[in-house]
Image: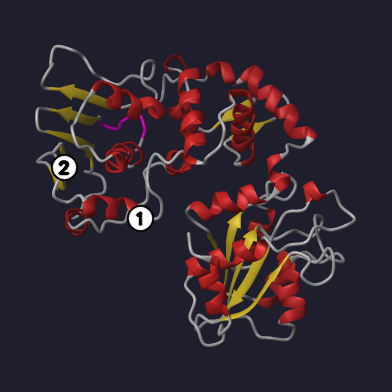
Amino acid sequence: MLDEDSLFLKLKNKSNEVFSDEECEWITYYESLKSRRDKEHDSNKDPLVGALIRDKNGHILEISHRASGQEGDHAEYVLIKNKLSGVDLSECHLFTTLEPCVDDCRSHEGKSCSSIICKTEIKDVHIGILDPNPTVRERGLSLLFRNGIKVYPYSGEIVELIYNSCDTFKNPTSEEVELIRRFKKDVLPFFDVSAVETYLKDFCVANNETYDYEKNLNSFILDLIRRQFVSFDARHIEVNDSIKILFYKNEFLPHLLCRQIKIIDSRNPEVDRSVTTIDYPLPTLYHYIENNYSFGKVDKVAFREIIANLIIHRSYDINDSLGYITFDEVEAHFKNDASKKLNHAHLKDLSEYKAESKPGDGVIAQFFNLANYCERSKKGQKTFYELKDRITISISDNNFIDVCYKYY
């Protein structure tokens, strides 16, 4: 998290200072908190929005928030039509906490923020979160794409802060209430209850929330719906495969080789420790290992980061190979097949704790981040580096990435 006071101190000389993407994201978030509620609307239905425009040299031209002009004015409209009217923005970058509106929803005098942005021929748009309103969601994004404007998402903890700052996103609409009811009736029976409960408890701990199963479950389902990980029509409900991998019972996953991780304990080899979907769904894997093994001075953050990497940096198609966790008296090895993406440059970066790679499953990574199962924004490699006397990364003969953790 970037400090608000230091950012706004820097903004006092914004025409001369250079601002990074991360700084711009945090500035728009803090600016969004200044948004006034429209008097003519229900205060729970008007999202907080902050926006800014940065020029090609990295200088911020202007900042705005919802209703920073007249009541009802959207942040992007204020920037383009009021503060920067007549300015050539073709080489500039727009940052906004919320997906820009479209012509028939939340528009200003019939002109949506998306259409106004497109007319400026702005270079690219950085968006904090997509609009949760199903009549708007991804339509603004689609319009920008069709007009040749590049779009980049915000990343890390700021996304959840933006989401949680908007009251409208916390309260389901009447349509969403019905979808939650349908989900509980027709989908929830497929879920492993222990996996869901474990995840919700960990999520509450990570986000300093009080655990209340029914309340947290409703929020969890609503999040699945709004992120479009669950889709509905009149007769059917379709669930994203990654959500199935995380939470479904084994008997409902005949074509998904989900928890493909085998645990081998050389100290007790006669006991089969293979992780199966019935016994140890992914959200409970940490707790299983923590409860069954004692490693002495184990750094919990690093330990979780290693397991998270083992899980999220693998694919789950039907032909994928096993991952392995092996324990002996002095160390543990966590191995993943890297034959599909391994090259010498990547190996060098891994061994020097500098590797940057997209997760094999972005949805699983997203849910792991929310429950603090792993670090965000490349901090995992930093965690490994700080414990380099105990953590080493290498490649085994059969092209498996091998993360070795020494207990002491």
Residue visible at 69% across and 44% down in the picture: 169
Residue visible at 41% across and 41% down in the picture: 361
Q: Is residue 367 above or below residue 106?
A: above
Tell me which segment is drawn in magenta: 316-321
Q: Residues within 10 Å of mark 2 (few under 14, many from 20)?
A: some
Q: Which residue is mark 1?
A: 378
Q: CA distance from mark 1 to mark 2?
A: 23 Å
User: Which mark identifies residue 243?
Assistant: none
Mark 1 or mark 2, earlier in chain: 1
Residue type at mark 2 is: Asn
Q: Is residue 282 above or below residue 367?
A: above
Q: Tag 1, which secondary structure?
A: loop
Q: Inspect this view and state whether residue 40 appears.
A: yes
Q: Left or right: where does residue 279 sit relative to residue 91?
A: left
Residue visible at 77% across and 79% down in the picture: 82
User: Which mark identifies residue 399?
Assistant: 2
Q: Tag 2, which secondary structure?
A: loop
